[in-house]
Image: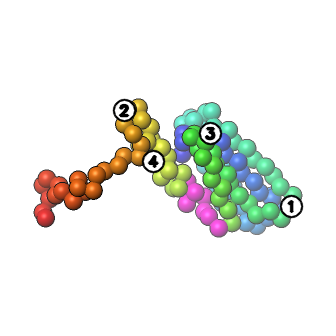
Amino acid sequence: MLKFLSKVRIEFNALDTRTAACMEFLAQCNARKAKESNPACQLVVKRRTDDHPPQITVTFVNGHEEVFDATLTSAQTIRSMILEKGQLLETEQMFREAGETWPVIIPEEELRQPAPGTKV
């Protein structure tokens, strides 16, 4: 999961009862396998003393930043979103390395052609 990220910022108040997702996500980020996937990923934990809701901010390797409200989103959902977006980043990178334009635009007439080996 961390291989797609350059920075993770987790903010929560330790006395707040809504910190479950933050704590679980922090544990996932601190796992040996996650750290080995991208040792350069910066992990920042900010312990708050105010009533601000727990939040997780992730910065992808392409610079895109996404903020998750950890009171409404589970750690597993956040992880799944990161992996999904990471697969898109990998696909984009493969096309760019191959000298292809991104996004790939498929002509309308090709979309209507029957695929070989399928029933029409």
Q: Which of marks 2 and 1 is nearer the N terminus?
A: 1
Amino acid type of the residue tagged 4 in the rendering: Leu
Q: Earlier in the sequence, mark 1 or mark 3?
A: 3
Mark 4 is surrounded, within 10 Å at the Cα level, by few (under 14), some (14 to 19) or many (20 or more) other residues, namely few
Which of discs 1 and 3 lies nearer the camera? The answer is 3
Can residue 32 be seen by looking at this rendering? no
**Which element type, helix, strand or loop, lies under badge 4?**
helix
**Which residue occupies 36% across, 32% down?**
98
71 or 6: which is nearer to us? 6
- Please provide percent x and percent y for residue 67: 66, 56
Amino acid type of the residue tagged 1 in the rendering: Asp
Residue that mark 3 sits on: 6
Residue that mark 4 sits on: 88
110 or 38: which is nearer to us? 110
- Please provide percent x and percent y for residue 59: 63, 45
Quarter in which the N terminus is drawn: top right
**Which residue occupies 16% across, 58% down?**
114
Horizontal side of residue 59 vs 103, given as left or right: right
- Separation of marks 1 and 3 at Cα, in angstroms: 27 Å
- Separation of marks 3 and 2 at Cα, in angstroms: 24 Å
Q: What stretch is highlighted in magenta?
A: 72-79
Horizontal side of residue 120 vs 78, given as left or right: left
Residue that mark 1 sits on: 50
Q: Residue 51, relative to residue 38: is it above or below?
A: below
**Which residue occupies 60% across, 46% down?**
64
Which numbered tag is attached to residue 98?
A: 2
**Which element type, helix, strand or loop, lies under badge 2?**
loop
- Separation of marks 2 and 1 at Cα, in angstroms: 49 Å
38 or 34: which is nearer to us? 38
